[in-house]
Amino acid sequence: MSSLPKQFVQRLRDVHKVKAEEWLRDFDRLIYDCEKRWQMKMMPPFDLSFNFVAPAIRKDGTEVVIKLVIPGDEFVAEVAALKLFNGNGIVKIIDIDIAKGILILERLIPGQTLASLENEEEAAHIASQVMKKLWIPAPSNLSSIPTTRHMEEKLINTYKRNTEGLGPITKEILQEAVDTYRSMNAMPDKPFLLHGDLHHYNILMAAREPWLAIDPKGLIGDREYDVIQYLLNKLPNGDSTQVIEKRIDIFVKELNLDKKRILSWGFAHSVLATCWTVQEDGRYSEPFFDAIHVCKRLK
């Protein structure tokens, strides 16, 4: 555990509390067991956010990626989504241990993210092709993967805890976003299996296909919902209206999506996403907050 970045360790403790302490205490043993079980040598990790992710080399020379997480519902949903996507437009699973939170994946080489492209339109076209490969009609009776109704419930719970508003978001905007979630979920389009967190940094350059997605959260809902995270990322400083609208127009054309549905989902999810970023000192994601008003203006 001594080699883990302090910020990463603190983030785990903030999110997972007691579970994090247990996981961190056993981390060195977990690494040792993984290296022995899969006959691999672990390399220094990638930049860490909420999970430990590192490249590794197996005894036969195969390069892989190992992902270690604190087991829970999110991990179960991720594994279920990866299995259902089955490598189409996304990284392939090599092996799993759900109980221990271990995921062995193919390594995508060269691995640059879509964020490395400077051409905005080219990036959006590439993202649309990845989406086209990923999305499949949602299997029935799939309880391991959340739906957009779960996102609605998360916002409702946030509103109940913050009836006068949260950070820069007024109670009126919170109520409007809750109403939008309710109305959109009440008239769903045909539900699809979605990535759930598809943006520039989760689309990587690869050898098996030119570009492949990584790190799905797994979500069931409208296809229009799955483009929102892309819209919220890598935005310019200042007014982002033109960039967001251009991205939407490309997705509408390439994927046969409904622009009004994108904007409605975009408004509702941008409110929820902004709520997630509000800090005790008042800081929040300004691009996410600005996107709320961009979606309202474009509707």
Image (cartoon, rainbow, N blue to C red):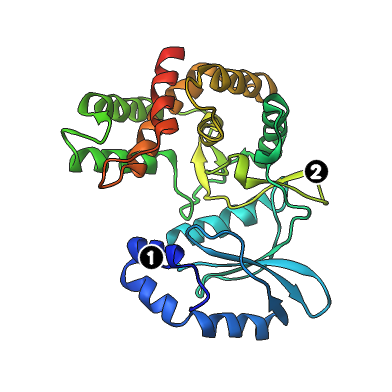
Name the residue at 25% across, 43% down.
157
Q: Is residue 141 left or right of residue 84?
A: left
Name the residue at 55% across, 16% down.
242
Q: Residues within 10 Å of mark 1 (few under 14, many from 20)?
A: few
Measured as percent of width and height from the top left, residue 88 is found at: 73, 47
Measured as percent of width and height from the top left, residue 90 is found at: 69, 49
Q: Residue 39, relative to residue 123: is it above or below?
A: below
In terms of secondary structure, where does tag 1 sit?
A: helix
In terms of secondary structure, where does tag 2 sit?
A: loop
Query: Residue at label 2?
Result: 210
Measured as percent of width and height from the top left, residue 254 is found at: 69, 23
Badge 2 amino acid: Pro
Measured as percent of width and height from the top left, residue 172 is found at: 22, 24
Quarter of image, res 265? top left
Q: Nearer the viewer, mark 2 or mark 1?
A: 1
Name the residue at 19% across, 43% down.
161
Name the residue at 54% across, 22% down.
244
Residue 276, disc: none
Q: Residues within 10 Å of mark 2 (few under 14, many from 20)?
A: few
Q: Is residue 248 left or right of residue 20?
A: right
Contact flag, marks 2 and 1 (Cβ < 8 Å): no
Badge 1 amino acid: Gln
Q: Residue 148, relative to residue 75: is it above or below?
A: above
**Residue 287 in view:** yes
**Residue 299 in view:** no
Residue 10, disc: 1
